[in-house]
């Protein structure tokens, strides 16, 4: 029998503007998206009431990370004033920030397994670490 793995996810949606630097095409012009970020959290043991982590706590953490972008120009919000605003780099940012917050809250029992970022319904980037 395999070892147990429990995984939950929470979505966070924000509306913002951005431009892809050096794109050379239409995406270099200022434009907007309703980004959807899905953070997947995993644990091999559950807490005392049978949860990886409460959905509400995961929502609070992802909102802490993501709210800074809502109704902003993402290119002006650190660290994206210094790096490109691709879905891949946004996914990596959410992964790193959420990993830090979950480690602080749960002491390593709960980790981020992946982050999905949709720029629109059909365009998805995934970041995970192996
Ligand atoms: N690998 C990536 N490619 C592109 C990214 C990205 O983050 N990673 N981003 C863009 C632009 O942000 C662009 O706004 C989104 O591109 P696209 O999905 O092509 O957007 P459209 O609204 O034009 O979608 P259609 O399905 O073509 O209507 C570009 N590439
Ligand atoms: Zn775009």
Image (cartoon, helix red, strand yellow):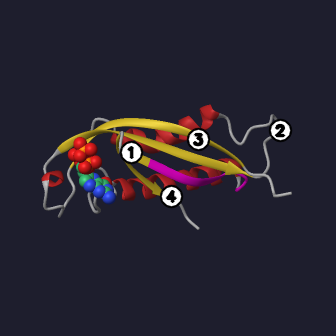
Q: Distance between the residues labelled 3 and 1?
A: 15 Å
Q: How far apart are marks 1 and 4 (CA)?
A: 18 Å
Give SS at disc 4: helix
Give SS at disc 3: strand
Which of the pair 30/77 is nearer the observer? 30
Q: Residue 48 bears which disc, if any? A: 2
Q: Is disc 2 surrounded by few (<14), some (14 to 19) or many (20+) residues within 10 Å?
A: few
**Magenta region: which residues?**
108-116
Q: Distance between the residues labelled 3 and 4?
A: 16 Å
Tell me what residue is drawn at x 61 percent, y 31 percent.
Answer: 56
Q: Residue 118 bears which disc, if any? A: 1
**Quadrant of the rendered structure where residue 68 is?**
top left
Tell me what residue is drawn at x 15 percent, y 46 percent.
Answer: 30
Q: Is disc 3 surrounded by few (<14), some (14 to 19) or many (20+) residues within 10 Å?
A: some
Q: Mark 3 points at which residue?
A: 9
Give SS at disc 2: loop
Q: Distance between the residues labelled 2 and 4?
A: 26 Å
Residue 113 inside the magenta-drawn segment: yes
Mark 3 or mark 1: whose residue is earlier in sequence: 3
Mark 2 or mark 3: whose residue is earlier in sequence: 3
Q: Which of marks 3 and 4 is in front?
A: 3
Which of the pair 82/46 is nearer the observer? 46
Up the image or down, 69 lies above or below 127; here it is: above
Mark 3 or mark 4: whose residue is earlier in sequence: 3
The answer to whether residue 16 is left or right of residue 98 is left
Q: How many marks?
A: 4
Residue 92 at least partly seen: yes
Up the image or down, 21 lies above or below 18; here it is: below
Which quadrant of the rendered structure holds the C terminus? bottom right
Mark 1 or mark 4: whose residue is earlier in sequence: 4
Give SS at disc 1: strand
């Amino acid at each position: 029998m395999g070892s147990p793995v429990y995984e939950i996810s929470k979505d966070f949606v924000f509306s913002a503007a951005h431009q892809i630097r050096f794109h050379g095409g239409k995406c270099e012009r200022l434009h907007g998206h309703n980004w959807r970020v899905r953070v997947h959290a995993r644990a091999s043991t559950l807490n005392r009431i049978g949860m990886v982590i409460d959905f509400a706590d995961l929502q609070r953490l992802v909102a802490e990370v993501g709210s800074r972008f809502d109704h902003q120009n993402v290119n002006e919000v650190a660290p994206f004033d210094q790096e490109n605003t691709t879905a891949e780099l946004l996914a990596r940012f959410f992964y790193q920030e959420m990993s830090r917050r979950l480690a602080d809250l749960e002491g390593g029992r709960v980790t981020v397994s992946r982050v999905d970022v949709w720029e629109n319904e059909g365009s998805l980037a995934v970041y995970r670490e192996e």
